[in-house]
Amino acid sequence: MQSVLITGGAGFIGQNLVHAWRAARPADRLVVVDAMTYAANVRSLEPLIADRSIQFVKGDIGDAALMHRLFDEHAFTRVAHLAAESHVDRSIADPEAFLQTNVLGTFTLLKAALDFWQAKAMIERARFLHVSTDEVYGSLDFTDPAFTEASPYRPNSPYAASKASSDHLVRAFVATYGMPALITNCSNNYGAYQHPEKLIPLMIIHALEGKPLPIYGDGSNIRDWLHVSDHCDALMNVIEHGRSGETYNVGGGNERNNREVVGLICETVDAAFAADANLAARFPSCPAASGGSCRALISFVTDRPGHDHRYAINASKLATELGSRCSVGFEDGLRRTVHWYLDHETWWRDVTSGAYKAWIDKNYGFRIAV
Ligand code: NAD
Ligand code: TYD
């Protein structure tokens, strides 16, 4: 039985991890800490909070007193650290918050964990998993081999630089203090509960509402799409069975360019409307409601500055050492994701009211058709 802290547990991957952990390891005690930024949503966790399957704490990982108090109260033996500012476009518009949370917040959390585990002589049996991104490795050309754990760090966005800094801090804590930490660097996740400012949910929701589907630049940028359930399985495997001090890359083995991804979303939404006559009444502005295709909504707009061309992950270390392999193919995962958003309209309508509209104006208002 472990006492587990999950930071950022009300975010996209965090919520999925909390549910996956609860199901896989029912004996563990789970505490979630989350600052409840714009990206957080606690609704899916409410039943677990109500029946005391988890304890939820609203708080900032940069609050040293709170972090020390939580360690004293719960004597955590596992930390899965996911709390972060996570959106590249927001890091371009407003980078400060990324340094505060991703760098200083990670430092504060690391220090609280180390202080507690040293004081209680728990270093040997404790584990700290730092969840990071492939974006720290920079951008690949189309013919380059995929990123390995030995690839040099070359971050290009303020987000990637802040995550790279946090990875370096974790590495330094391992080398200097013997911190029992592991790092995972994963590719783009998709699936249930992803905030609709990210590519896949944004395109699904815009398609349903008959709004333009804004592809940055010429849409040739490639990402390696990882279903969030495969990612969560890998995280639980790494924290338990990975070698302390090591880094593991986690990838989906699903490289697609943005034109392909958006095209597939359009086909999937079109097919859903063809199969279910009720959808036309629920989403009358969607082109598929009147027999057309969502592809008509695709528009190419001003590119993101510093837009990385390609990410690709070589996940063979994870497969060879720990036996973790992805099981969700991209077409299947995307179909499941489109249907999740169709089935959770109330969830995304809530998330896209209020401040979300201001973000859409800020990020898309200046972009022109190219
Ligand atoms: P997210 O933005 O959906 O969720 C992040 C969560 O962290 C939110 O609930 C937010 O409220 C919380 N948070 C932010 N600042 C905090 C603070 N100071 N204290 C406590 N909580 C705070 O992000 P996500 O997509 O779930 O990503 C989770 C982790 O995985 C991040 O570290 C991210 O860098 C990493 N990652 C994500 C992806 C992806 O495709 N989503 C890919 C690679 C790596
Ligand atoms: P995103 O989901 O923001 O993830 P990341 O930047 O971390 O990879 O974007 C994924 C890709 O989709 C990226 O190449 C940028 C592109 N993109 C668009 O073309 N249009 C959009 O509106 C968004 C949000 C992203």
Image: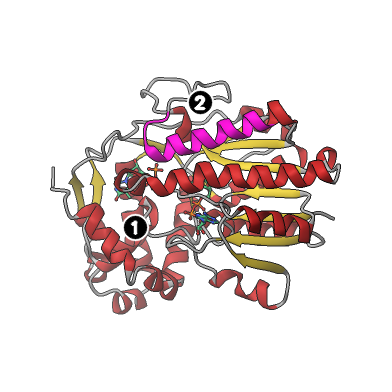
Q: Which residues are magenta?
A: 155-173
Residue at 18% across, 55% down = 365
Name the residue that disc number 2 marks.
147
Relative to 60, say whether 86 is above or below: above
| Most frequent secondary structure within the magenta stretch | helix
Residue 131, visible in the rendered structure = yes
Residue 230 horizontal/vertical position (percent): 60, 47
Q: Identify which amino acid the numbered label 2 is placed on.
A: Phe
Left/right placement of residue 113 relative to residue 327 reads right
Q: 319 or 97, which lies in front?
A: 97
Q: Residues within 10 Å of mark 2 (few under 14, many from 20)?
A: many
Relative to 206, say whether 326 is above or below: above
Which quarter of the rendered picture does the N terminus lie within? bottom right
Q: Is residue 142 magenta?
A: no
Left/right placement of residue 213 relative to residue 330 reads left
Whether the residues at callouts 1 and 2 have beta carbons within 8 Å, the answer is: no
Name the residue that disc number 1 marks.
202
Residue 102 horizontal/vertical position (percent): 50, 44
Relative to 116, say whether 160 is above or below: above
Query: Of the numbered discs in the image, which one, if any, rests on residue 353?
Result: none
Q: Residues within 10 Å of mark 1 (few under 14, many from 20)?
A: some
Q: Is residue 156 magenta?
A: yes
Residue 351 horizontal/vertical position (percent): 40, 68
On whether ligand 2 comes within 8 Å of the CB at mark 1, the answer is yes
Q: 158 or 187, which lies in front?
A: 158
Counting residues from the N terminus, which is met first, the one under dot 1 or under dot 2?
2
Q: CA distance from mark 1 to mark 2?
A: 27 Å
Determine the secondary structure under disc 2: loop
Residue at 84% across, 43% down = 122
